Amino acid sequence: TFVRLRISNSSLFSGKRNASMWAWRAILQHMGLQQKMTYTQASKKWENLKKRYKELKNPPKGMRVFPESWCHFALMDDAIMGRLEGSAPILKALPSDKDDGDFLPISKPKKKKVSSSTGNVAGESEVILNEEEDGEEETEHEGRQVSDCVMLEGDNKRTVMDRERQVMEKEKLVMESEWKVLQKERAVLDREVAALDRDRASLERERALIEREKALMEKDRYILSRERMALEQEKARLERLNATKDRTEDITEDSSKRNDLDTTDRRERFLYLFEKLVENF
């Protein structure tokens, strides 16, 4: 997190006056370390990380190094190569004197005047410098401890992230296997759907054949109906002809009978007259 925040917020380190201080304070405040580390310690830790990386990345000729032995080499390599841009939130460095109480104050070395029998000014300056060096060494030691804690926290987070990544990989494998099973089931369903479509098409063809046969039957029925009507009409015509013929025969027979009666009457009358004539002779 420390390295990622530094790289992602490189724009805050503009080189202007106190820009670095406010940028490091924003990073420390975001990490919750504003009461454990000063901005100078954070800056020095960053410089030490870059120095160690450069020593392992570009060692002197003839010197054999093992970058993998340093647990932060891969992280620093990604940082220096620009692969960590945007991997952490972008912070705002707002300078304000009111927030000074929220940050760990920078310990200043106390100047102690040591009176010597000789009253040598050079000896007094040497003591002051020694006090300053001791204070700087103590501050650097504290900063190193805090930064080591920060890096250890980063390592722990990386371990957690690696575990989460492994869990995600396992879940991904499970999901891929389930996806393959779903694909197989989908293929089976597609085949069944294709079979149903073929059956449906066959049924549609059979239905079309039945409809055509039904239409042909209706047509044949219509033709038979017309032929039946024609037969009925022909039968009626024949019946009318037969009735007319019967009436004609009856009339002819009646006429024949009437003619026979007339002939018989004339014959009888002739015979009667002939008998009368014979009697008269």
Image (tube, rainbow, N blue to C red):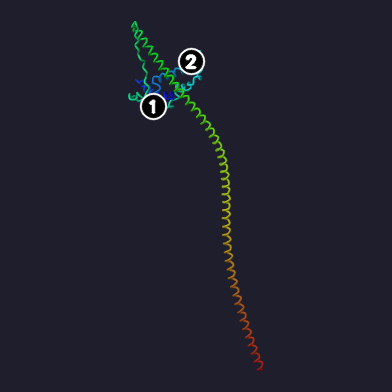
Image position of 228 with respect to 22: above or below = below
Contact between marks 2 and 1 (CB within 8 A): the answer is no
What residue is shown at x 64% (from left), y 87% (from top)?
Answer: 268
Give the residue number, with chain letter if any, for mark 1.
91
Q: Secondary structure at mark 1?
A: loop
Q: Position of residue 150 (x, y in %)?
A: 44, 23
Q: Position of residue 277 (x, y in %)?
A: 65, 92
Q: Amino acid at mark 2?
A: Pro
Of residues 88 and 269, the one drawn nearer to the viewer in this rendering:
88
Q: Position of residue 272 (x, y in %)?
A: 64, 89
Of residues 270 and 222, the one drawn nearer to the viewer in this rendering:
222
Q: Amino acid at mark 1?
A: Leu
Image position of 212 with respect to 8: above or below = below
Image position of 135 with respect to 5: above or below = above
Label whose residue precedes the other's in the sequence (2 or 1): 2
Q: Position of residue 33 (x, y in %)?
A: 41, 24
Apparent side of residue 100 relative to residue 216 in the rendered image (left or right): left
Give the residue number, with chain letter if any, for mark 2.
59
What residue is shown at x 48% (from left), y 15% (from top)?
Answer: 59
Apparent side of residue 25 relative to residue 152 in the rendered image (left or right): left
Quadrant where the N terminus is found in the figure: top left
Mark 2 closeness class: few <14, some 14–19, many ≥20 residues within 10 Å: few
Image position of 198 with respect to 101: above or below = below
Q: Looking at the image, how many numbered discs can be counted on the residues?
A: 2
Q: Tell which residue pokes out farthest to the bottom in this image.
A: 280
